Image (tube, helix red, strand yellow):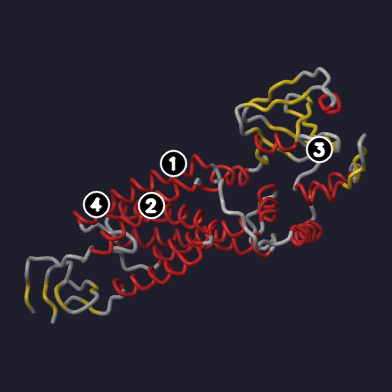
Amino acid sequence: MKTNGHKRQLPLQTATAALPLLAFCLSLLLLTGCYHKKTPSYFHLPDSIQEAQITSRIKANGDSIRQHGEADGQGDWQRSANRTDSFAFRVKHHYSQGFNFIVRSDSLMLLRQQPEEAVNKMETDSFAVMQGKSLVVADIRILPNDKTDSVWVHIATEDYTFGWIHESRLLKQVDPDDPISQFISLFSNMHLLIFLIVISLIAVSYLMRKILKQNARIVHFNDINSFYPTLLAVIVAASATFYASIQLFAPETWREFYFHPSLNPFSQPVLLNIFLVLVWAMLIIAIAAFDDVRRLLKSGDAMLYLCGLAAVCAVNYIVFSVLTLYYIGYLLLVAYIVYAVRIFLRRNIDTYICGKCGARIHRKGRCPHCGTLNE
């Protein structure tokens, strides 16, 4: 057995070659504009099928809004223009009387007078509800002769004031009063996604520089002997792809989840059940990956590795969730899974033990830990 002070250097051609590709992908995302400008889908679940799934879920699980309306004897709303079934409106619009919102924009303007006065161009007055204030739907009125928006919503504020507003204006400026819904709204914001793109580009560029100079550990390129980080990155990519697919092919199903979110992976339609299972798997695998990183690396190296893993997951989320809207994400996901598994198996399956220090090594030859030549 021979000893030598030189340590084995990990080939880094793959990491260097990945930089131009990563820069190209992130530049493409900046030009395409995230979720707000996507290619229309010609293949999607018909609204009737999605509404049938939503209806069956409501009837099976019970719906607090529906029960609230029936308890108050308000199964139907009496309006001046027509009479609309409240349950049908609930299924199609995903909210009803008694639903709680919170103001997301800087302010929300409500009309003090009746909506008929605004439609007939009569003199009206309005007042503002500031950001963060809670709202509740007091009534809904349908005015077919309103060319702007036939649906008017009567809002009650937490200050016991009432006002009317078009549904289209209301939904652009509020979020459902639920932390999961607000989290979804936050991560669907185009400005936040652009911010994540910039931060991810900076983080990945920094980590690649560290790899080139210090042979630092990072998932896919100089990984540790644990499959959990690779599995986490793959699950994030798959979840982002599935998330974008629901938005693309079943938007009403996603809107129903947005208005009535749940962390129970078995209380939603099938598509959402699969998505929630992936979310829970992501959390469990993240805990397992953190535990393995903490066990295999020193504190400083572990922190750098976890930052790199977070950056890779952020890039995966952005790339796959956006490119799936243009159908590119599916082929990219298959290629990414094959690449991630192959690169892990090739570099991280330890079959030998160093005869001097006892460290696990990939193949016979010089030990990367102590420099001993194993024959």
Rounded to the nearest whole Å, what is the CA distance between mark 1 and mark 2? Answer: 13 Å
Viewer-side label of 3, 1: 3
Disc sitting over residue 209 in the figure: 4
Amino acid type, callout 2 = Ala
Q: What SS does tag 3 mark?
A: loop
Residue at x 74% of width, y 28% of height: 157
Amino acid type, callout 1 = Phe
Residue at x 47% of width, y 54% of height: 317
Q: Residue at label 1?
A: 195
Q: Which numbered disc flags the more N-terminal residue, 1 or 4?
A: 1
Q: Which numbered disc flags the more N-terminal residue, 2 or 3?
A: 3
Rounded to the nearest whole Å, what is the CA distance between mark 3 and mark 1? Answer: 37 Å
Residue 298 image point, x, y percent:
27, 56
- Is 168 above or below relative to 109? below
Q: Residue at label 3?
A: 150
- Relative depth, front residue between 145 and 36: 145
Mark 4 neighbour class, 10 Å CA radius: few under 14, some 14 to 19, many 20 or more: some
